Image: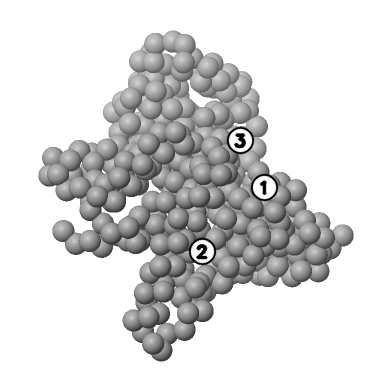
Amino acid sequence: MSKQIDRMSRDEKPQVPITGRTELDALITNSERENGILLDQSFSKKIQGPITTLAQLNPAQNSHSGSEFSHQSFYSDEEPWNIDYITNNLESLEQDLNWKNLSDVVIDLKSLFEHIRLLIIKNINKKQFLYKYNVLALRCLYILGNAMKIQGNYQHAILYYENCLSKFTINEPTFKGKLLIEAGKKCQQYYYDALLHYEQLNWRLDIAYVLTLLSRLNGWLKNPDVATKLCYESLAIYRDYLPEEDECIADTYFILAELAYLRKDYDAAFQFAEQSISIYELNSNKDTSNNKESSGSCNDFKPQLSPVYNLLGILHANTNDYKLAQKYFHNAYLCVKSDSLKKAQILMNWGIMQALECNTELAQKGILKAKQISSVFLNKSDLSLRLERNYQELIQ
């Protein structure tokens, strides 16, 4: 087996930038959005209309509505009454998820979804009602996904979540984030299947790699203790089979540093981050000695080091050492060779450190540059809006 193992790309790891000059808790390297809270009554006001209505879906796209949902006519000719009736039923069924027989709740939800589908057909030319029924259909699918997940029926849960994402255009970031997180949880089962597969083959390095992926996933899902145990197991295997300077080990140290940060164990986070950097620096020195024409300054800022430097900047910011935080954010910035959202986030962090040090002019320049970079990649995105807010605060 080749010693080189594809590592999880850190560039693909979701990063949440600082959202305000004093919000140091928002200096995190992965998403910590709450995903256990169910939808509230106000969510419907934040969702823009679907790209297709459920009434327009073909049979293959809408197989559940044709085969699984029973038809029990209940609706009246008064649309406001129907909307209130369905809304109240959805709220009641949502509350029943943890208290009543789930099989009965699922049956009721499927029946309610069929009623909504028929009302969509009935009101296909009444836009003022059609929009509201589509929102109710979206909410019903989401609750059905949650019910299936609680039952342990992950295959069907993922189908409901995917339908929410594929059949509707959702511009409300919190709700869409919840859906994406719930859909992403499905990959955990695939990781376990892969782990079992490699354990049967006794391919130790592949086992370590899957354990690393599982560790990072559990970290994103706010299970840092479980994630840390998995990561330690992965590290033990890597150290048995790879030289200490292998970058797979450096990556694993970095994940341990992230997990320690999530637990607010800053001492451990500093230690693991420094161990990760030391391995990269050792390899950098080897590369320099093997290539006499190579300059050390180029190797000092390898792209792989960007997330490590960024994390060290965050750690120093949380321990009120803003000078060192600036230094590490600057190093992280130098590691990113081309403009990207990642680069904009790092610049934003650096700019806020400047603001905390009362360097208003530098802070303005940093956040304005971050705003310019992000505008190329996103249009009216959450990140762009945050950058705009930070910039406006600084120039006031």
| Sequence-earlier tag: 1 or 2 | 2
Q: Nearer the viewer, mark 3 or mark 1?
A: 1
Q: Amino acid at mark 1?
A: Thr
Answer above or below: position of 103 versus 208: above
* Quadrant where the N terminus is found in the figure: bottom left
Residue 181, given in percent of the width and then of the height, sits at 46, 40
Q: Label 2 belongs to which residue?
A: 306
User: Toward which corner of the image does residue 332 lie, by quadrant?
Assistant: bottom right
Residue at 25% across / 62% down in the picture? 4
The outermost residue toward the bottom is: 293
Label 1 environment density (alpha carbons within 10 Å; few <14, some 14–19, many ≥20): few
Q: CA distance from mark 1 to mark 2?
A: 20 Å
Residue at 54% across / 67% down in the picture? 340
Q: Nearer the viewer, mark 1 or mark 2?
A: 1
Label 2 environment density (alpha carbons within 10 Å; few <14, some 14–19, many ≥20): many
Which labelled disc corresponds to residue 44? 3
Is 78 in front, or is 166? 166
Secondary structure category for the residue under label 3: helix
Q: CA distance from mark 3 to mark 1?
A: 41 Å
Residue 9, given in percent of the width and then of the height, sits at 39, 59
Q: Amino acid at mark 3?
A: Ser
The outermost residue toward the top is: 100
Horizontal side of 93 relative to 102 (left or right) equals right
Q: Amino acid at mark 2?
A: Ser
Secondary structure category for the residue under label 1: loop
Q: Label 1 belongs to which residue?
A: 319
Is 371 in front, or is 288? 288
| Sequence-earlier tag: 3 or 1 | 3
Residue at 47% across / 79% down in the picture? 296
